[in-house]
Image: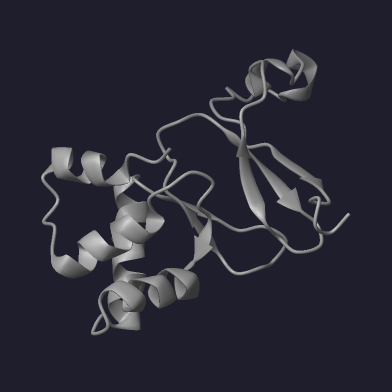
Amino acid sequence: MSDLLERLRARGWRMTSQRRVVAEVLAGEHVHLTADEVHARAVARLPEIARATVYNTLGELVALGEVVELSTDGRAKRYDPNAHHAHQHLVCSNCGIIRDVHPTGDPLTVLPPEERFGFTVSKADVTYRGLCPACA
């Protein structure tokens, strides 16, 4: 589960009512909302919040490394608050739903040395694709 609010408080991030609402909307397990979805949910909690405020707050959270911006298959960018917990993503090829998955093993060890072309590999982003139960 996302501990985004706690992480932001520990950083001393100025917690305005608008920022708090955006962080609360992003809280939870398997949360991968678009900016428009974040805005719609934020408006339900704080009707006066502006779309620009949501976009700016999401940009700040990404810049801080507290939220990961995901882009899959040219769809709208999505925001993942699970930035500090190692995981990969499982994406439905039809509806685009994204789930966090935690495969066993280290994806960095899968790439053989001869396929690294002299690179010092420090990170691997793996995305699994398929059909979710609703689309299958």
Q: How is the model colour-coded?
A: one colour
Query: How far across and how far down the image is residue 32, in percent?
Result: 53, 55
89 lies above or below 87: below
Q: Is the N terminus in the top left, top right, bottom left or bottom right quadrant?
A: top left
Q: Can residue 56 be spotted in the picture?
A: yes
For image coordinates 73% across by 14% down, the residue present is 113
Residue that appears at 62% across and 25% down: 119
Q: Please indicate whether residue 114 sits to the left or right of residue 136 in the image.
A: left
- Using residue 34 as the reference point, say whether residue 19 is left or right of it: left
Please identify the quadrant where the C terminus is shown.
Answer: bottom right
Q: Position of residue 28 (x, y in %)?
A: 43, 47
Q: Is residue 122 above or below residue 58?
A: above
Q: Position of residue 90 (x, y in %)?
A: 70, 43
| Residue 59 appears in view | no
State which quadrant residue 121 falls in.
top right
Q: Is residue 31 left or right of residue 49?
A: right
Pick the residue in front: 116 or 65: 65
Image point 36% across, 72% down: which residue? 55
Picture coordinates of residue 59, whole percent (x, y): 35, 63
* Residue in the foreground of this view, choosing between 121 and 22: 22
Q: Looking at the rendering, which quadrant does residue 26 occupy?
A: bottom left
